[in-house]
Image (tube, rainbow, N blue to C red):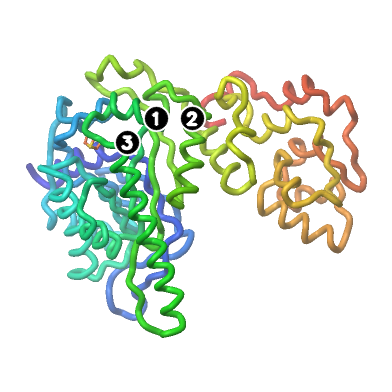
Amino acid sequence: MDVQRKLEILADAAKYDASCASSGTEMRDSSDGKGLGSTAPGMGICHSYAPDGRCISLLKVLLTNACNYDCLYCVNRTSSNVPRARFTIDEIVKLTIDFYRRNYIEGLFLSSGIIRNADYTMEQVVNVARSLREEHHFRGYIHLKTIPEADDALITEAGKYADRLSINIEVPEEDSLARLAPEKDVRAIRRTMGRLRLKLDEAKEAQKKAQVSKAKPPRFAPAGQSTQMIVGADVASDQTILATSANLYGAYRLKRVYYSAFSPIPDSSRALPLSAPPLMREHRLYQADWLMRFYGFDVDEIVEGAGMLPLDIDPKLAWALRHRDRFPLDVATASREELLRVPGFGTKAVDRIIATRRVTSIRAADLSRLHIPKQKALPFIVLSDHRPSPHLLDAQNLAQRFKPKAAQLGFGF
Ligand code: SF4
């Protein structure tokens, strides 16, 4: 099989993994004429690669899709009837370098089906990264998928070469994982996340000491660890999913939890749903995740009742509509924590408000300059020239006002 055909198969096989985004890594460049490639903060989030060579920033491939495991939700499971392929280490290295030079990509996301066993697979994945970094002096972004049961020494080595490591938690509940992915062990997944966290903490500590001693600190995945949860492959509610995320962020200091809406696969098991969940559900989970990480919300505040997020309005607006007694909020005197709960107020907007109100009072006309969507925020705030009428704060009125028309409920909403 030629490399192009392998690429078609293995890039397609990798597309279901959402856990890659090139953010939060350290600065590395090759402007000194040594090495190849560079990473810079905020250089973009790049999730996939098209086999025809169109630029989509990360070359996102599997080493092989011939997997020994039989996870029911996965198109690469051993019982799946799909064409199989396997790259050699040299083939992936060459592809990465070639695409980088042609400006198609800024880095590599590499995962793999399980070949022989966890250690052998991890060793192959690490060998790709080692070759790129040590033989080709590649300084672009590398994200490696970590095999939970792999030997500690291999994980340490992976962290030496990769910017980010990730282990997929897959589904939020242990019994669902046992049913859908019988070879996977949630304790091994969490144990390895714990090992990664320790190594990340040690690397951070070593870096602090190195600033004093000027010694070169050992490197370990500067962009941290992330994970992915599949949404809608089991009956887990949004509340369960978000509670699992909150636990993962707290216990293992994950940089990101990615949510991937389950997509039905050919010849799938009867244990799986026949249709995909609405993509809007995935979108709402991302919004709720941001509320937990940057806006001071707890899971139980975001999701109430049946444990599902509303699909028609965003979770922050839904919370504000349930807590109208807290509004309208006086922008001149409210605390930062209170301001963060106003629909339409982002974290940067809140910082701008706080800076502005120190020197002048804020008027309705100032909202656009502060990058705040006026229509969304005005019913919830008091400004020097604005106070919403009680009629505007009426739940029914507000809900109707913000609900999108039926046609807007597609993915683009
Ligand atoms: S281990 Fe499971 S999820 Fe990963 S490639 Fe194999 S079958 Fe798919």
Q: Is residue 347 left or right of residue 54?
A: right
Q: Are marks 1 and 2 in contact (CB under 8 Å)?
A: yes
User: In this rendering, is residue 166 above or below 272?
Assistant: below
Which amino acid, by three-letter code, is at mark 2?
Answer: Thr
- What is the number of the mark on residue 173? 1
Circle 2 is placed at which residue position?
240
Q: Nearer the viewer, residue 299 or 175?
A: 175
Are there few (<14), some (14-19), or many (20+) residues within 10 Å of tag 2?
some
Residue furthest out toward the bottom:
213
| Quadrant assignment for the C terminus | top right
User: In this rendering, is residue 184 above or below 236?
Assistant: below
Q: Nearer the viewer, residue 152 or 257?
A: 152
Q: Is residue 82 left or right of residue 304?
A: left
The quadrant where residue 341 appears: top right
Which amino acid, by three-letter code, is at mark 3?
Answer: Tyr
Circle 3 is placed at which residue position?
16
Disc with the residue nearer the chain's start (1 vs 2): 1
- State the SS at label 2: helix
Query: How many numbered dots are placed on residues in this image?
Result: 3
Determine the residue positioned at 36% across, 67% down. Answer: 38
- State the SS at label 1: loop
Q: Are marks 3 and 1 in contact (CB under 8 Å)?
A: no
Provide residue 96's location: percent of width, then percent of height. 23, 57
Q: CA distance from mark 3 to mark 2?
A: 22 Å
Viewer-nearest of discs 3 and 2: 2
Q: CA distance from mark 3 to mark 1?
A: 20 Å
Determine the residue positioned at 34% across, 58% down. Answer: 106
Q: Is residue 254 left or right of residue 48?
A: right
